[in-house]
Amino acid sequence: MKTKYSPKVAHIDITNNCNLNCLHCRVLDNHKETNVLYNLNFEDIKKLLMQLKKWGSIEWISIGGGEPLLRKDLFDIISLSKKLGFKTLLVTNGTLVDKNIVEKLEKAELNRVQISIDGMKKTTHEKIRGKNTFDMAVNSVNYFLKSKIETTIRMVITKINYKETEDFIKYFASKGVPSISIRRFVPVGNSSKNFKELYLDSKVYYNILKKAILIGEKLNVKIASGDPLLSIVKTDLKKIDIEGYIGGCTPGITYLYISYDGKIKPCPMLDISLGDIKKDNIRKIWENSDFYKKIRNREISGKCGECKYKWICGGCRANALYLNKNLWGEDPLCWMIKK
């Protein structure tokens, strides 16, 4: 059965190989313990991109990992994506970036890069991401800002670094970074082992998001997030009319995710296979998946199901599953359910 929804963004994790082992990593708990390394091979990626091109709705291809720069054919993958007419984003930890890498990415016509930095202080960032990583990541920002590639920063908010959020935004805004992404911590992968050290109280998290938006507006910096809860904060602050609008949690609505093992999954945080790019027709999965249908219809329970914001938010299904053991239940990090 056809759906009125079509993907606008396809995120593809091309590898689970990484040169770091971050405290909050969603990936590394899988292959570090089982010693299984996955790389989507170039031909499979090519076939995938060709399918997505025929679909006709996708505007952005987001390339992640693991660390994509560990793949020697990354530049060929980006070039192919661009030749097919996609705007292309690279997600990297920045530690493998130098002037030569940036020049190669420019030649491949990369549109945007997102660099992961998890603190304003070197000690904070390196407690999360490992020794000798902070300077390399910040230096990568400097390299990209001198290029034609749009440069964005992502910070995962945890109990370790949340007090630095305001200074973080101000510093990178002063350097000319146009967009900063604030992401929640989800207890999956390495994160599940470090839950007590990383997880924030919902009210603290709300105040961080609210302050981040206000600072961003003042400094003319876009504050973005993959977190559905950000939609609630923005709506409340700007008094937006939400009638007829759907947003927040958007797998099956505007967002498609392909994992490093070739599996079609709801999002990077949910290890639930909906299909396989090597065996299944992606478009049929998109149209017929029960998971996607439930997300589109907001078939969620608990206070999320009763919430007036469910169509613009929907809560984080991964957080609901890992913390409450209920995929379709309420999001434990939402401050609304505490009222």
Image (tube, rainbow, N blue to C red):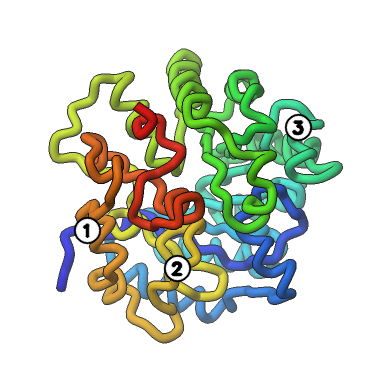
Q: Residue at x 37, y 82 (%)?
A: 280
Q: Residue at x 44, y 41 (%)?
A: 332
Amino acid type at circle 2 is Ile
Q: Is the residue marked by circle 2 packed among few (<14), some (14-19), or many (20+) residues within 10 Å?
A: few
Residue 306 shows in this picture: yes
Which residue, as the protein is rendered here, is positioned at the far top? 218
**Quadrant location of residue 334?**
top left
Residues under labels 3 and 2: Cα distance?
32 Å
Which residue, as the protein is rendered here, is positioned at the far bottom? 279
Residue 221 shows in this picture: no
Query: Which sits earlier in the primary sequence, circle 1 or circle 2?
Result: 1
- Mark 3 or mark 2: which is in front? 2
Q: Secondary structure at mark 2?
A: loop
Q: Up-down: is 37 above or below 113? A: below
Q: Secondary structure at mark 3?
A: helix
72 to the left or right of 214: right
Rendering coords of residue 311 (x, y %): 23, 42
Quadrant containing the C terminus is top left
Query: What residue is pinned by disc 3?
Result: 124
Amino acid type at circle 1 is Tyr
- Mark 3 or mark 1: which is in front? 3
Q: Residue at x 33, y 19 (%)?
A: 237
Q: Which mark is residue 272?
A: 2
Q: Up-down: is 280 above or below 287? A: below
Q: Which mark is residue 5?
A: 1
Amino acid type at circle 3 is Thr
Q: Which mark is residue 322?
A: none
Rendering coords of residue 144 (x, y %): 65, 39
Rendering coords of residue 21 (x, y %): 75, 54
Query: Which sits earlier in the primary sequence, circle 3 or circle 1?
Result: 1
